[in-house]
Image (spheres, grey):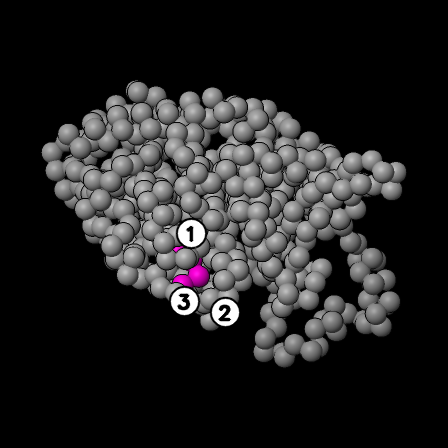
Amino acid sequence: MSDAILTGYNVHTEEDRQKMLAAMGKSTIADLFTEVPEHLRVSGLLDLPPPLNEWELERHLRDLANQNATTLDTLSFLGAGAYEHFVPSVIDAIATRGEFLTAYTPYQPEMAQGILRFLHDFQLTISKFLGLPAVNCSVYDGATALAEAAWMTCRITGKRRIVVSASLWPDYRNVLETYLRGRGVNLITAPTDEATGQIDEAALATLIDEETASFLFQSPNRFGVVEPMTRIGQLVKEHDCLNVMASYPMIFGLMKNPGQAEVDIAVCEGQCLGLHLNAGGPYLGIIATKTEYEMHLPGRIVGQCTDLKGEEALALVKEEREQHVARHEATSHICSNQANLALRALIYLCLIGEQGFRNVADLCVQKAHYLEEKLTALGGVSRVHTGPFFNEFLLTLPKPATEILATLREQDIFGGVAVTDLDPAAPDNQLLIAVTETKTKADLDRMVECLAAAL
């Protein structure tokens, strides 16, 4: 029995190919590649298996996908910048509607008032959330948001020296260096206190001088430690320097927002705001700043205007990208934004409300501290730092973290992130563990039991 009808994926017949070749004045397909040297061309057919019909191909892909382990079927304590928060189904239902699910930029406001409306609402919601008045339509992710904010401070001050906390996530630091390396910006590293895991404020005070554009720090930082952002803000202001904070926005359910803490530019990774975990993204970069720095924001800003009939409308009131202005005058060379993900964040924040957001943050803190208390009661396990933490903490173990994780993996547990995966120079017995509201007491007790058995 032949499956020939079901295995063909090439829509062009031999007759089609001959017509196309004739239109180009060619006789054979090989004639199209005469510019490629003979020794670089593949001769004969590739050694490939026979084609599959549609249902065989679907089954094959499903079998491949089933080899993956996901947080849907594995107890996960992974973090390090991406966290397993609950995503209400209504977010998927709304954000995937055809009216919203488009990559098209709303250049023609008369055709895109719906998209412009939710982007404007996103800006207003994030502004209230972070306590800073100026917000753009988003950028790629938290790391690029920080890099854009760093370059903003150079444009604002005209200086090319930036002090950066050593406790920044390594991938954020890598993106920062990539963005600024070719722009003549000098990055100076400010050390952390080995005991607390927080910024060494005395050392920071000696590093900031009159040539410094800004100080960049992250809270919670790469150790999960929460930084004293108000004290840092006051210290930086004393040195006439801009203050840039990267954060995990869930902490603002329980803590001061950046606008209340002397922060000039706040950036966030918005993944925890209604976005599913994805290997490699896409995620959501958020930037907010003070009114006086608004025109230095990268990307686009939606604002109110008046249409030809004199009625209120929305439009892109700022879009100083290289597509619209001279390249050297553009505030950013980011060519797109994460509009659909901004919509997801907006739906999430509106859906759970202020009290709901506080409840989620409180659950994260309570459950993380419960697990930390139970784990550090085990022999040979201790917390690395004494500084306060939100929902992520760093442990020292009596054996290499990779060995512990391998044992936990056999029990269908992602036990956290070995710090050597983030920094090869770090001690091999340190494990970073994150806890969110999705973990039950039974989950936490199971983690304690299995980790104890793995020691």
Circle 1 — which element? strand
Compared to residue 126, the image places residue 246 above or below, namely below
> What is the CA distance from the residue labelled 3 to the residue labelled 1?
14 Å
Q: Is residue 51 left or right of residue 115?
A: left
Whether residue 151 is visible to the viewer of this picture, yes or no, is no
Helix, strand or loop for the magenta stretch, by majority: loop
Residue 136 on image: x %, y %: 60, 46
Residue at left offset 71%, top offset 38%: 115
| SS of the residue under disc 3 | loop
Q: Position of residue 161 (x, y in %)?
A: 41, 66
Q: Earlier in the sequence, mark 1 or mark 2?
A: 2
Going by the numbered disc 2, the residue's amino acid type is: Arg
Magenta region: which residues?
Answer: 211-215
- Lower sequence index among marks 2 and 3: 2
- Residue 346 or residue 12, whichever sits in front: 346
Give me the residue at 79% from left, 58% from top.
14
Query: In the image, 185: left or right of 21?
Result: left
Instruction: Work out whether residue 341 or residue 28 is closer to the camera in this orientation and state it.
Output: 341
The amino acid type of the residue labelled 3 equals Glu
Disc 2 to disc 3, how far (Cα)? Answer: 16 Å
The magenta stretch spans residue 37? no
Label 1 sits on residue: 243
| Residue at x 61% of width, y 54% of height | 295
Residue corresponding to mark 3: 211
In the rendered image, residue 364, in percent from the top left (x then y), is placed at 36, 28
Q: Confirm whether the magenta stretch covers residue 213.
A: yes
Query: Going from the N terminus, do you reach mark 3 or mark 1 first?
Result: 3
Residue 115 drawn above or below residue 337: above
Q: Nearer the viewer, mark 2 or mark 3?
A: 3
Q: Foreground: 436 or 263?
A: 263
Q: Which residue does the numbered mark 2 point to in the structure image?
A: 183
